[in-house]
Image (cartoon, coloured by chain):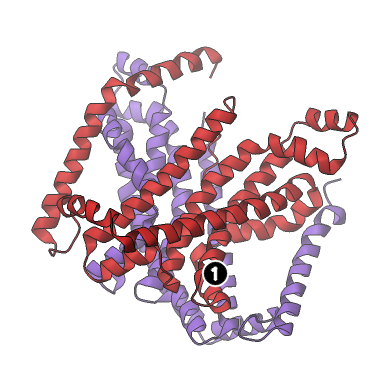
Chain colours: A purple, B red
Amino acid sequence: MKTGLRYYAPFWLSLFAGIAAWEIAGRSTSAAFMVPFSETLVRLWQLVASGEFMRQLADSTELFLTGFVLALVVGMPLGMLLARVRVLRIGIEPYLMIIYATPMVALIPFILSLMGFGFAPKALVVFLFAVFPVIYNTVEGARSIKPELLEVAKSYRSGEWALWREVLLPYTLPYAMTGVRQAIGRALVGMIAAEFFLSATGLGQLIMSASQNFDTGGVFASILIIGLIGVGLMRLGLMIERHFARWRQ
Amino acid sequence: MTLATSAPATVAAEKPARSGTLVPRLITGLVILLVWEVVVRAYAPAYVAKPSTVIVAIPRVIVDPAFLSAAGSTLLAVAEGLAITMVFGTIIGLAMGRSPSTDRALRHYINGFNAMPMIVVLPLFSLWFGYSGSARLATIIFAAIFSIIVNVADGARSVPREYIEVARSFRGGSIRGLFEIVLPASMPYLLAGLRLAGGRALIGAVVAEFFVSVGGLGMYILYNSRSYHHAEAFVGVIFLAAFGLSFELIINGITRRFMPWYRRDEQSS
């Protein structure tokens, strides 16, 4: 039986064991090293109650959304264009692959040196992290279209809209959504990276200032929150991807 | 989609890969380089990297001992981190794959850590390990291990029943069964995990070097871009990308050589 206590017991047990281990480890080592779970929760509550957490969350969300939406607005049309124009896609493919495989973090020092501190360079970082998965995956989707389909459409003198509706969109959209899922994760990484290495705002600043003040409890609390946000966003991304995977043939 | 349409499709899709692709790719590459050069010359300060300065800088950088020791330091750390990751990741992954209760117990932690942006632990690791190479190694391991665990667990879970039953009928002990049956059967998954882990390990190393100021390729890039030597710093980026690419090629080569029957599933994250 996959339901009931027997099935879920290990999950709750391990959750409880994890919390207990955290608590014990925190109490038995120095406060600079590790902070018990209970104190972490207290610190978290302090951050929320003082409004600081919400302020930083708002800053981070603004940064994340700006970069991410920009990446979608630029990436998806570009990806679709590359899906439609074969010769362009073939030309760009290898360079796209190289850029997609390059760690974007390595470009952060250049952006810092060129654009300094401020909102724009950080949004640019998030944008760069997010845009290439979208483009690359959309192009992957375009590559999956069997050439016969396009040939048949052409031989029937299919109009442009029909071409999109019947062939291009159903094939590229699921892949594009995979790209969106990856982009969500990468945009989160980019956001934190920008907040660490460019000017500190938002959730990144929370962690940075906590670690600089040796407020280990604050560090743990912030990591916990960001971890939960990361999990939540990944779930969202998977949901979006799965919804469109129904179209996948 | 019937088999009839899929077989010719692969042939038709393979054919253009020879002649028709080289010219567009060359032209696109040249256009990209040209646009880069012109735009940067026209609008950006003189120190910004452009193809002309980068190409000139490459021979200078390659023989620069500072660069070589930085590259060596990073690569060594990544190799060390990956080795440790492989050992522990495989053990945990096998445990999760073969034991449903271990899997259910650990799965949420593993997925949680996997979803967390790896940069987030940097301040914590710098508190724990100080501003040293250990912090970088810890970051590399943290970045890479979850890819290995998840993939090995997947592989261990999907070992065909017949293999296990054959092992049991030969009265193989379960530890022996683990090493001689489950592990080889999960090799494709392990390699897929290794491919992902390598990329993440590299990112972890660079990001750790940014944060903790440990000598390495990341520091080289940071230092040179701060001192307005963008061309030299860009050579560092090229080297990073090249290393990532060659790692990918090596893994692909190993997969093809030792497991020619295996078709890679797109399980990218």
Q: Amino acid at mark 1?
A: Ser
- Residue A6: image location, x then y, percent: 87, 54
Choose between B54 and B142: the one closer to the eye: B54
Q: Which residue is mark 1?
A: B134
Residue lying at 43% horizontally and 70% vertically, measured from the top left = B214
- Residue B102: image location, x then y, percent: 78, 54
In this rendering, position of residue A179 left or right of residue B1: left
In this rendering, position of residue A168 left or right of residue B56: right
Q: Which quadrant: the N terminus of chain A?
A: top right
Label 1 sits on a secondary structure element that is: helix
Disc 1 residue crowd, few under 14, some 14–19, many 20+, Cα 10 Å: some
Residue lying at 16% horizontally and 64% vertically, measured from the top left = B47
- Residue B44: image location, x then y, percent: 14, 62
The numbered mark 1 sits on a residue in which chain?
B
Residue lying at 59% horizontally and 66% vertically, measured from the top left = A228
Q: Is residue B214 above or below residue A210?
A: above
Q: Is residue A38 above or below residue A68?
A: below
- Residue A68: image location, x then y, percent: 38, 57
> Is residue B19 visible from the viewing direction of this image?
yes
Occupied quadrant, residue B45: bottom left
